[in-house]
Image (cartoon, coloured by chain):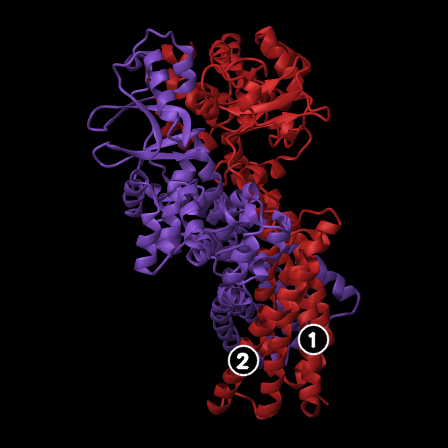
Chain colours: A red, B purple
Amino acid sequence: MTEATKNTHQISVDELWELWPTLNDKERVEWFAQLDHTDAEDFFSSIPCEDQAAMIELMPEREQRHWMRTLAPDDTVDVLQIIEDEDTRSNLKGFLQSKARKEIDALMAYKEDEAGGLMSPRFARCRPDMTVDEAILYVRRQMREELETIYYVYVLDNQQHLLGIVSFEELFKSEDSKKISEIMDTEPTTVHEDMDQESVALLFAREDFFALPVVDSDNVMKGIITIDDIVDVVQDEATEDIQKMGGMSALDTDYLQSTFRELYTKRVGWLIILFCCTLLTTRVMDHYSDAMSKAIILCVFVPLIMASGGNTGSQATTLVTRAMALGEIRLRDVLRVLKRELVVSSGLGATLAVIGFIVILAYHFLGMLPDSVGFAPLAATIAVSVGVLVIYGSLVGSMLPFLLKLCHIDPASASAPFVTTILDASGIIIYFTIAKIFLASALS
Amino acid sequence: MTEATKNTHQISVDELWELWPTLNDKERVEWFAQLDHTDAEDFFSSIPCEDQAAMIELMPEREQRHWMRTLAPDDTVDVLQIIEDEDTRSNLKGFLQSKARKEIDALMAYKEDEAGGLMSPRFARCRPDMTVDEAILYVRRQMREELETIYYVYVLDNQQHLLGIVSFEELFKSEDSKKISEIMDTEPTTVHEDMDQESVALLFAREDFFALPVVDSDNVMKGIITIDDIVDVVQDEATEDIQKMGGMSALDTDYLQSTFRELYTKRVGWLIILFCCTLLTTRVMDHYSDAMSKAIILCVFVPLIMASGGNTGSQATTLVTRAMALGEIRLRDVLRVLKRELVVSSGLGATLAVIGFIVILAYHFLGMLPDSVGFAPLAATIAVSVGVLVIYGSLVGSMLPFLLKLCHIDPASASAPFVTTILDASGIIIYFTIAKIFLASALS
């Protein structure tokens, strides 16, 4: 029974969701208490564990006991890991039944982002020498003490070694008299307890499992990871990558839930880095100010040239980074990627070069070009620069994620803005070098 | 039995994966035939349905029958929907058992990206008046004709209306004698057959279901969607968004699997659009060439100013677009977002403005500034421009996804390059306008 059920005026889950970001922890507890019982369960299980922890700390003891016993083992661990105060933590643990407490202690050993941290220690088990109907009865008995999933039954020996897996489908299809050892899959896919959650997610994505057994190095069964937790992992990992690729650090919570302070700190870091990198560009520009003063028309096209490189670069980076995250591209594929980008970007470069040439041609006939520089050399400069920068951009953009991965930095840090910034300075050098070739007379 | 099993020299799945992109359809069939039986099953089920269709068309009849009967109903539908030739399609359908054919025909009615297209018509069912152990026996009998999942049993009346759901957990926990109607959940979450797959995925992500029932408008049960299919949907939707946000159209297959032609066509479109938009920038630059010729130092800072706006812009766009894709932000949140961006970007703008000022100060003392323009007005121009553009960039960047959504365009099209391009032209105008205020004397 929670406070909620004994409260007079009620609030709906949606209303509370609206208010949530605007409330401090104390207010959250108060408002939350006004949800009716079932709503409260749904709401509490759907808020991030940071919020759960903060609220539990402020709740009256009776509430604390209720929620500690309501949360699933893996969630309880997340909450306990957040709470700093040693005493509070042990108090909260005190509310757990001894069996649950043992499970929690076992799980606490794992990092949040490794397989062990995702896993539930409650799974259906049986022995290889049982008959099918013995196994069904045995599992039915285990049901009574909540199992995380009943989709598979795990066949263990007395030392808890994983001997095989029987899907319930299989179990139900087979005749009662068959031995489990006859119908079990003896080479099941397993996950090592230290495997990081991204790799676990890829496993689930590639083949369609409902649950995977987690084992230690001696193939002792530790627990199971169910696919419902994986959907969230996949979603979160993608969001994290997308935000990094947008040129910022990943947020810890929803955009609308996160504080102004967080939004600022997560964004300002990269902005400053990028700003400082761009300063290099200004130095480069400055270096060519003489050339520019002789032919202002050259500055006029600077944004166009830089954009051509930056856009293809960010395309290439995005493609490679995502493919890496999905495990489609590994370090050893670097040459295949290089080859593809070279071929494709040559095509892209040629296309844009032609368009660039046509544009200058148009400007020429519209009399929009200054007389100081002739049409031909300018057209050549623009067309060639665009073509070269598109190819250059794709190559740099596609190789950057490899470089980062090699340095054990998340390739997703190769954001579009980052690539563009890197390309800018070098792009300008390429541009003016080409210009000096074709416009030698005008610039001398 | 497939060709594979009767083949002399074998090839491993991994080897075939390496070769795959380099092979044409005919070669693919030949190489594929060299996989041993189980490998063949795994491999075939893991390649995209376009490839499955292309291969099946080229296979000998015996092979065709085998694969048509091996594929799950929902996959069969995908394959059949791809095959254009009417005769081939009806031939292939001919290989299906009549029951399966009925299922397929029912599924073919749905679009691939609707709930109906994801769903399997094979689910465990029972009647409300059965007892628990009757139900268990009844479901065990259904097992024998492959069910997609046995995690839930769906309680239907004679007109196939969905009355309730019993999880196997519940079914197994309860005593044999209890009636299903006593233990079933009578208000289950359901999915309408027309719901688009992105929304279905969000449902699975928000709450942890293993399967959801698909019903039509009269609450008649059509089938179930299992979470294992959803993981792929979530993964694919994210990849699609990421690629769009990288400034290109989404690829149909893996980066390494896709042809050069596809890579080119998917990328060139946006590049041309962006290129043409940037032409506007050159016109704007040209408009200020007079000012620039008077103070070349102004061009020198153009890349810096533009980058400041572009980078914050792409951050804001990325945040909002992703939050929209996750259903965290809806159109009606536009004002909340605007407020957040205004506050946060003011902070970011101030920060970068200060840094900008310090930089100019440094340049000044290092004697890197021309005498033509004084230190103070230039410092003011840069600092103010950077600050204003950061704020301007975040606002434009955060509002663009709303605008696109309003026009029923996928917000993910608001890619970093796109936003940057949009900001460039206007950014330059803002910059030179500010410059003309502070540098009036130098520019007159």
Q: Is residue B243 above or below residue A38?
A: below
Amino acid type, residue under disc 1 in the picture: Ile
Q: Quadrant of the C terminus of chain B?
A: bottom right
The residue at 59%/81% (across/down) is: A383
Indicate whether B24 appears above or below B32: below
Task: Look at 61% across and 27% down and name the residue there.
Answer: A186
Q: For the residue labelled by badge 2, is the local secondary structure a helix, a strand or a loop?
A: helix
- The chain letter for the residue carrying disc 1 is A
Percent position of residue A33, x then y: 42, 17
**The furthest residue to the right:** B366
Q: Nearer the viewer, residue B294 or B316?
A: B316
Q: Is residue A12 left or right of residue B158?
A: right
Image label count: 2
The residue nearer to you, when weighing A429 against B271, is B271
**Residue A237 % position (x, y):** 57, 41
**On what subunit does the disc labeled 2 rest?**
A
Q: Residues within 10 Å of mark 1 (few under 14, many from 20)?
A: some
Residue beneath disc 1: A430
Secondary structure beneath label 1: helix
Q: Disc 2 marks which residue?
A: A356
> Mark 2, residues whose alpha carbon is within 10 Å: few (<14), some, or many (≥20)?
many
The reply to whether the C-beta atoms of the residues labelled 1 and 2 are less than 8 Å apart is no
Q: Amino acid at mark 2?
A: Gly
Kindly report the distance in space between the C-alpha atoms of the residues bearing marks 1 and 2.
Answer: 16 Å
Mark carried by residue B155: none
- Image spot of residue B47 (x, y percent): 51, 50
Quarter of the rendering containing residue B336: top left
Picture coordinates of residue B99, whole percent (x, y): 30, 38
Can residue A84 be spotted in the picture? no
Residue B358 visible from this viewpoint:
yes
Of the residues under marks 1 and 2, which one precedes in the sequence?
A: 2
